[in-house]
Amino acid sequence: MLIVRAPGECRRAVAELPAPVGFVPTMGALHAGHLAVIDRARDENAAVAVSIFVNPLQFGPHEDYERYPRVFDRDCELLREHGVQLLYAPSVETMYPEGFSTTIDVGRLSEELEGARRPGHFRGVATVVAKLLGAVAPHRLYLGQKDAQQTAVLRRLVHDLDIGTEVVIARTVREHDGLALSSRNVYLTPEQRAVAPALQRALRATAWAIEEGERDPRAAVELGRMELTAPFREDYIAVVDPATFSVQEELRRPALVLGAAYLGVTRLIDNVAVPAEGGADPIVTPRRSQHGSLRVP
Ligand code: PAF
């Protein structure tokens, strides 16, 4: 695996890779969720590039930028084991040198829910991913479904700026008890870890109420909320339109049930899809066979 540190070096290295190239942007501290996305990118492309960059622009002043887990050598070992050809790992100074001042604002989509709770977060995500895509110029960009609103923001970015990369969303990987894998799960104490799956249960209960015919999204959320007991502190549970992320006042399918909640100082997010009747998951991209064509189920 070749490790490159600067955008020009990255572009030259990608030009040497066989096409198509699948790209997985990460902040490191890789877990089985990242590795599943990387494996999928490897299955569907001739080469895989990954980035590791803990992006200061997407963290708020009181968030966990400083303590975000950084385990570069272990990450490199995992990437080698999973057949990644290229790792782009720029420094903060390379990404944001003195005088850097351009940021990308994707508008309304980035203002609801996560955007409202974490002002500037999606501007930071859109800006860094635009820079990473500029350096890697992949055929396909792979993202995880767990950060549902991020996937919508980045789809919008790629579409609006004519970036010409296909966006592929991979299914969330979960622990045996339903907890979505996240680099932030390492912050949980054993007691918090034991109750953490309640967030997913709350979202599932909300989705289940809708599947069973509840027409009022607020009533469905109330039902789900009953799963989210102390020590969890709810930030929000909402039923949203998967295209616009606006909160649904009247139920329309497909829908997404999104949730965020705190265990101590750790904030967990998750989502559960409610497909259109008889339809497919509104976010996850169907798998392809290697190098492109859609796989017949
Ligand atoms: O999801 C993440 O890990 C980050 O938000 C991303 C997409 C790598 C941008 O920093």
Image (cartoon, rainbow, N blue to C red):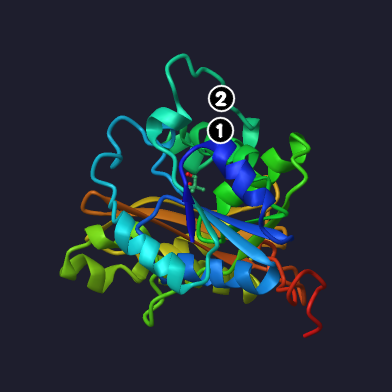
Seen in the picture, residue 12 relative to 166 is either above or below; the reply is above
| x then y, percent, for residue 291 | 76, 70
Q: Give the answer, above or below, for where 56 lies relative to 186.
A: above
Q: Is residue 41 found left or right of 230 in the rendered image?
A: right
Toward which corner of the image does residue 104 lie, by quadrant?
top right
Q: Tell me if 166 is positioned left or right of 262 in this view.
A: right
Q: Which mark is residue 291?
A: none
Marks 2/1: CA–CA distance: 5 Å
Q: Say whether disc 2 or disc 1 marks the residue closer to the N-terminus.
A: 2
Type of amino acid under label 1: Thr
Residue at disc 2, secondary structure: loop
Q: Secondary structure at mark 1?
A: helix
Q: Which residue position holds label 2?
A: 103
Disc 1: which residue: 127
Picture quarter with the C terminus: bottom right
Q: Are marks 2 and 1 in contact (CB under 8 Å)?
A: yes
Nearer to us in this view, 122 or 281 = 122
